[in-house]
Amino acid sequence: MTTLDPVLPLALLLPLTAVLAAFVLWRLVAEPRARLAWALRLIAVLLLLVVALRPVIPAEVDQRPTSSGGLEVYIAVDTTSSMAAEDWNGGADEDTRLDGVKADIAEMVAELPGAGFSLITFDGEAVQRVPLTSDGSALLSASDVLTQEITTYSRGSDIAEPVELLSGILGSAAEENPDQQRVLFYLGDGEQTVDSEPGTFADLAQYLSGGAVLGYGSIEGAGMRQFSGFANPFGDEEELPDYIQDYSSGSPEPAVSRIDEDNLGAIADQLGVAYSHRSATTGIAPVLDGLDVGDVTVTDGSETAAVEFYWIPAALLGLLALFELARLGGVLIELRGALRGTLPGAPRGAGTTTRGGRE
């Protein structure tokens, strides 16, 4: 909301402006030949008033919860095409596994206020989307826009893709603050489709004090729609993309993704944490039991700079001042010429003669 921060008290500023404006209006009426100049001066008075009132959008201080002693929560999310399988809510409303992931992340933020959060996603490569922050809204904003990988770029699923990135992130964090508590949540369906055995997560366990592996999907499985990188612009069921096709049998058939709980259980064992199968009918609170965020305090966030608008009328006032200076310059030149013609000893006009015909 825009407010005023006047350079002088309004009780003084407004009467001064009224006196100046009244004088200019009087001259505007009294000097009809100079009405343009006085009209511009009236505008200048009004602009000067706006500048003196100093309209601003005040600075804001963001109050955000931060943890004292606290807890670091790292969330690794599978964003391969299989996470677009439509079996999160039993196939109802075409909800995908990623919809379940987003719901669970939102519940984590609500259940662990003050914790530090970091979001890592992985498909063809692993990326840290949100560096460690105690601003839960940043995590929610990032998770809300999570999408599956672009279908044409899919190279298959490797459930251990994030291990190398997580090792670097967790190792650096442990070196910087060895006494901090850290937990890791792995969110995926466990489906391994690349032609290699999945790597191990065992080396990450040394950095962790807890966490969980959360599994999404069903044994029956479900189809996945293609994704071009752009959201459906129509919002119309008839315009939804086609399902991803499976050509392994020689003829195209809708591909079906199924949860692999054996792989997910193996990841949990390697990390030394529990495995939990997720569904739309159960909350995530039991998974978070026993996690201690620490003493939560509310500290001032960074203060945003006040946004000032006085420079806009000030710029216009400067243009009017230039016009006034140019006009005064012309008046001075005319006055100088007139004075030179009336001063004693000024050159006589051409054509004058003295007696005898001599000049």
Image (cartoon, rainbow, N blue to C red):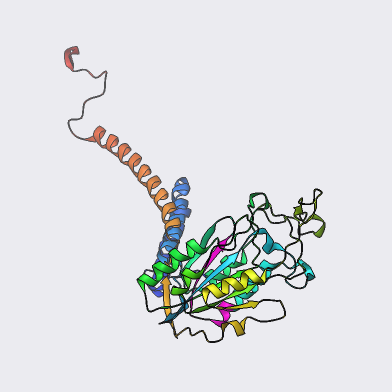
Question: Which residue appears at 55% of the width and 60% of the height?
Answer: 161
Q: Nearer the viewer, residue 43 or 38?
A: 43
Q: Tell me where residue 115 appears, x and y as whole percent.
A: 48, 78
Q: Residue furthest front?
A: 197
The image quadrant of residue 125 is bottom right
From the viewer's perspective, is residue 136 above or below residue 123? Answer: below
Question: Which residue appears at 72% of the width and 63% of the height?
Answer: 257
Q: Residue furthest top?
A: 357
In the drawing, does residue 13 fall left or right of residue 102? left
In the drawing, does residue 133 fall left or right of residue 97? left
Q: Nearer the viewer, residue 296 or 320?
A: 296
The image quadrant of residue 195 is bottom right
Report whether residue 199 is seen.
yes
Q: Is residue 27 magenta?
A: no
Report whether residue 22 is seen.
no
In the drawing, does residue 321 fall left or right of residue 197? left
Question: Which residue appears at 76% of the width and 59% of the height?
Answer: 235
Q: State which region is magenta.
A: 108-122
The image quadrant of residue 267 is bottom right
Q: Nearer the viewer, residue 134 or 242?
A: 242
In the drawing, does residue 150 fall left or right of residue 21? right
The quarter in which the C terminus is drawn is top left
Q: Nearer the viewer, residue 297 or 77?
A: 77
Q: Tell me where residue 104 appears, x and y as whole percent.
A: 62, 75
From the viewer's perspective, is residue 184 above or below residue 81? Answer: below
Q: Tell me where residue 182 appears, x and y as whole percent.
A: 46, 76
Question: Which residue appears at 53% of the width and 81% of the height?
Answer: 112
Q: Tell me where residue 304 appears, x and y as whole percent.
A: 43, 68
